[in-house]
Amino acid sequence: MSHQSEQALEDEFISQLESLDYEYVDIRDISQLKDNLKVQLEILNNTKFSEQEFNKILLHLESGGIFDKAKKLRDKMELLRDDNTMDYIDFFNYHWCKNSFQVAHQITMEGKYKNRYDVTILINGLPLVQVELKRRGIELKRAFNQTQRYQIHTYRGLFQYIQVFVISNGVDTKYYANNRDLNYKFTFFWKDEKNNNISNLKDFTNEFLERYHIHKMIDKYIVLSESTRSMVILRAYQFYAVEKILDSALHSKKNGYIWHATGSGKTLTSFKASQLLARKAEIDKVLFIVDRKDLDNQTFNEFNKFSNGSVDSTENTKKLIQQLRGTDKLIVTTIQKLSKAAKSNKKELESVKDQKMILMFDECHRSQFGEMHNTITNYFTNIQCFGFTGTPIFAENSNKNKTTHDIFGDRLHQYLIKDAIKDNNVLGFSVEYIGRYKNKSKYDIAVEEINTKEVMESDKRLEKIVDYIFENHDRKTYNREFTSIFAVSSIKVLNRYYEIFKKKNQELPEEDRLKIATIYTYDDNPDLTEEEVHPRDTLEEQISDYNNLFGTNYSTDTFSMYYQDVSEKSKAKKIDILLVVNMFLTGFDNKYLNSLYVDKNLVYHSLIQAYSRTNRICNEKKAYGNIICFRNLKKQTDDAIRLFSDENAEETVLMKPYREYVENFNSGVKTLHTIVKTVDEVDQLEGEDLKNFVKTFRDLLRLLNRITTFTEFNYKDLSLPEQEIEDYKSKYIDIYDPPTSIGEKESVLEDIDFEIELLRRDDINVEYILKLLKELQPNTPGFEKDKQFILNTMEKDIKLRSKIDLINKFIEENIVKPNENVNTEEKLEEYMDREKKTAINQLITSENLHQDKTKNLINEYEFSGKIKPMEVANLFTEKLKLKDKRRKRQELKQEIMDLIDKYTW
């Protein structure tokens, strides 16, 4: 059976669009595109443009980049007509039926190369949706890579108005927003309301590209993020949630709640719902209500990232009252402030108590279940409440309190944790239970609940747990590339853990110590025995240690500032383990947090919320969230997953046992050996065989990445010896980053994601190489062998291999003829700095750049890690040709980044 050709797929697709009332238009080049644009804009604006007037419009439309053009699309243009009157020109009408919808194909554009685009959807003559098709059987990523190449080489002028890309091979179809930097991880399947993928091109076209729907996506469901100057398009489940809220708010008086898995983008969903509701004339106020001041600030900052100045946060109750009485339509506040205002400031709020208000709660099951929620809903007479939660309260986990349904009414939409994991929006969990009940465990730690409190809190048990953490923490966090939280049962136990960690740290050299921080709240008047210290005093001491560690100056009097700093340092990976009782176990998002140690009882929503701190997507190396339980929480874990997903969700949410991964790895080794019997045979591979090797070994790397974090991991369990794995890694790196061009191999492998992050060796780093350099002994029999070992070791690490020639030269110049008083570390730093300056000067000369501007930009890049494209363009001393400008700018930017990467030690 022959495959449907790409041309046949394209013809069928265009016919389908025509059946959906798209007008087919024969446009082959930019000149015809502009002619058609003039006609369509005249229809939209019910006028005629002279050539001079249309040239003004083109000049306006073609200036700026992708983000600027996205804003222009949604704005009006002031046009000075030939008769000196002023007119306002629309490019996109918010009433979908007043726009024209056309489809064209094979439009040819010339930039660095000549490209023909598959299918282009024009709205009012502007290319707003670009569709790239591949025949059935071809990987979808090839279509994505094609849009990337087009963007670099030929997407110019009017084609920068593309808002949405669609890629398809007929069987699988995805969509994504147009941005300067495209990433395949941000391509999405469209879904139905029950979260089933609509992947077939025909079905996708009927649902997503139907004229009313694609107009709505462009009009309402693309967020222009001012902070990143990028477009963010909502995913299907976010779209359905917002639609349900809008429908309920505008066509009923019912409340409702959204059940979306923790980590699936609640802030974007709530922002878009709040923003769209605030635009409605019939709604007076939209209040987004959070539970704590830290989340108040966090949400305010997140909202204003999407649209600067779009929302006001309330600094205090007085400010909130001013905003409620003023013209602000969208306000972020805390439930505490709103409750206080409704309770104590009724007279000031008299004029607004009957206004139509929408209250959006960031988490359904926080404080609003209590008295404050009742105070608010009893005072304001014309409100509707909508809540978001990843873990609703049901009868099973209500603890005799009201359920989410009791408070908010019907569930409007759901997107469960199993859905989010399947879509790669969040990670699953690897849960290990460490203790004496576990077979063959060398850690004899009491875990069962039936043990007395005395045993569970004994010094002996806590010390064993700390020993376990010191022994395994680097394995769990990939040599501290990630960070962790340790949740314990009480402040008293936390303080004892802290002292044990502190004592253990003092016994270790500084480089092996774990950076420990604590945070908790306390009662002002706790019930203490004579021997016990007030929690505020212990926290004060711990903050003092924190100040000494980080050079800060906090105290319990500045607790909110301390809280903020702990949050920031955790996100910056400066804290290895954060000891908590309850804080930071809900609402804290940190993609670099990959491990949660647990020595407390957790159930249902508190368990899932705590576990979910670890499951934010970060990179290939972070394959799941590590949960290390020092109590037997297996039943509680299974029960929580069943409650918040379904009976069959465990396979999706929880990682497999260690032995199953080992079996899968060893099975993969057998597959590898059908392609190559030895490491040396890799060099002979070509074409599909080479591609199969890369895919097979990549699968082994993924499995190895998971296996090595298990406490019981041992290379002896694997059928491929450790040294052989390292040798295969070297070949894999050579294929990814060949010393010279490999022609055909490049075309075979161009669409493969090597997931190179998996090759980063945690034990091979700058400190390790420096240690080896210090140990080199010139004029000894083993010198050449030791030197070669250093160079070979660097070649195995993707980040260090670019520095091999530099280090070889350094050894020859500084170690072969050593100065006995030389400080290797200082000498290497001076050498790298000198070589870097030479390389920068060579770059300035070869590319004919402004010397001072170039050095300033490089200094700024080393400090901030960012390069602005327009600043790169200003480095050239000669004016670039328009057709070469973008390419030369990108090439120079990459040269600068590579240079700094090479010479930064």
Image: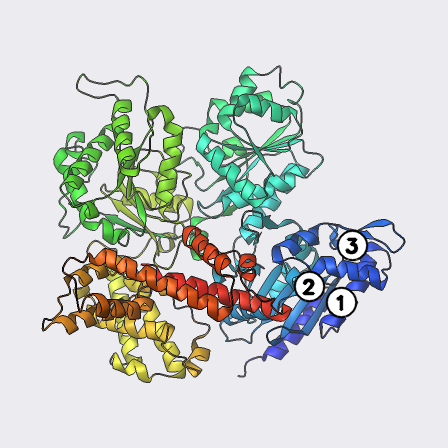
Q: Nearer the viewer, mark 3 or mark 1?
A: 1
Q: Earlier in the sequence, mark 3 or mark 1?
A: 1
Q: What is the CA distance from the residue labelled 2 to the residue labelled 3? A: 21 Å
Q: Kindly identify the residue that appears in the image at 24 percent across and 59 percent down.
A: 827
Mark 1, secondary structure of its residue: helix
Between 248 and 587, the one lying in front of the other is: 587
Q: Position of residue 285 (x, y in %)?
A: 64, 31
Q: Nearer the viewer, mark 2 or mark 3?
A: 2
Residue under pointer 1: 34
Q: Kindly identify the residue that appears in the image at 80 percent across and 56 percent down.
A: 44
In the rendered picture of this protein, how many numbered marks are placed on residues?
3
Q: Is residue 608 above or below residue 812?
A: above
Q: Is residue 565 above or below residue 263?
A: above
Q: What is the CA distance from the residue labelled 3 to the residue labelled 1? A: 20 Å
Q: What is the CA distance from the residue labelled 1 to the residue labelled 2? A: 9 Å
Q: How many C-alpha atoms fall within 10 Å of the one at disc 3: few (<14), some, or many (≥20)?
A: few
Q: Kindly identify the residue that appears in the image at 52 percent across and 54 percent down.
A: 195
Q: Earlier in the sequence, mark 2 or mark 3?
A: 3
Residue 397 visible in the current orientation? no
The quadrant holding residue 508 is top left
The quadrant holding residue 268 is top right
Residue 308, numbered label: none
Whether tag 1 and tag 2 are in contact, CB under 8 A, the answer is: yes
Mark 2, secondary structure of its residue: helix
Residue under pointer 3: 98
Q: Quadrant of the C terminus?
A: bottom left
Residue under pointer 2: 158
Between 673 and 770, the one lying in front of the other is: 770
Q: Position of residue 608 (x, y in %)?
A: 37, 42
